[in-house]
Amino acid sequence: MDVWKKIAIHTCGILLMCATFITIVNAARPPLKDNACATCHKDYGAIIPKTHPDVGKGAACLSCHAPDAARTEATKFSTQIHKVHQGEKTKLECTACHAL
Ligand code: HEC
Ligand code: HEC
Ligand code: HEC
């Protein structure tokens, strides 16, 4: 077998492994706890991003940003929430929000 065929086969194998890994990671959407945010945040008006569309003060974030089991990729909301709580402002265990 020539070297290019070997490289091609190895590349396919690696891509397949990556695809499988991503599928497994996405399939494991850890459910949120009940009242996941209210445990720590009483005043939603204080944590709403400055650039947020005007939704008034005090509405629970998850009433609009509801988890959708059919969605597999991260949203701007979940990305931002993870970033804030994983180093930017504080450092929380996954289980602070997720029922694992
Ligand atoms: C275990 C406690 C805890 C839980 C649960 C928690 N947070 Fe936080 N959160 C914090 C702390 C501590 C900070 C950093 C201090 C601050 O800004 O209030 C923070 C900061 C934030 C900020 C940034 C506020 C700013 O100053 O810019 C947002 C937005 C936020 N949280 C949203 C959420 C949402 C939405 C949830 C639920 C999915 C949640 N938090 C769950 C503790 C928590
Ligand atoms: C009344 C509905 C509603 C409520 C309540 C709400 N949001 Fe939003 N949020 C939206 C809409 C609409 C958008 C813009 C569309 C989008 O990006 O999903 C948005 C966008 C965002 C974004 C992405 C901003 C960007 O970078 O484009 C973040 C982060 C966010 N919201 C955080 C929060 C947090 C934290 C709370 C609770 C304190 C909250 N939202 C409460 C409706 C809501
Ligand atoms: C401050 C609360 C909070 C913490 C801490 C947190 N998450 Fe999340 N996570 C969320 C929210 C809110 C969502 C979006 C809800 C949904 O759509 O299911 C989410 C969604 C997810 C998703 C689905 C993909 C996505 O990004 O939307 C994965 C995977 C995930 N979290 C993993 C983790 C892991 C692993 C940790 C610990 C390293 C962690 N989370 C810590 C709040 C949190």
Image (spheres, rainbow, N blue to C red):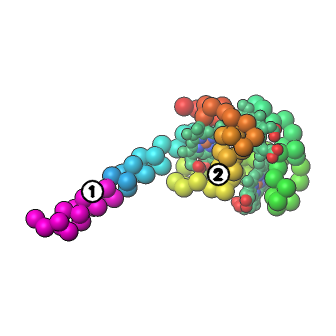
User: What residue is shown at x 75% (from left), y 40% (from top)?
Assistant: 89
Would the CB of label 2 be found within 8 Å of ligand 3? yes
Quadrant of the picture in which ligand 1 is shown: top right
- Side of 63 where 2 appears, left or right: left
Question: Magenta stretch: residue 10 in it?
Answer: yes
- Name the residue at the left extreme: 1
Total numbered badges shown on the rendered structure: 2
User: What residue is shown at x 73% (from left), y 36% (from top)?
Assistant: 90
Amino acid under disc 2: Thr
- Side of 55 where 10 appears, left or right: left
User: What residue is shown at x 48% (from left), y 49% (from top)?
Assistant: 26
Q: Position of residue 67 (x, y in %)?
A: 62, 48
Amino acid under disc 1: Gly
Q: Which residue is mark 2?
A: 79
Mark 2 → mark 1, Cα distance in angstroms: 30 Å
Give the quarter of the image for residue 41: top right
Residue 13 is tagged as 1
The magenta-colored residue range is 1-16
Q: Quadrant of the C terminus?
A: top right
Q: Position of residue 17 (x, y in %)?
A: 33, 52
Q: Quadrant of the N terminus?
A: bottom left
When the figure is inspected, residue 51 is found, relative to residue 32, above or below; the finding is: below
Give the quarter of the image for residue 12: bottom left
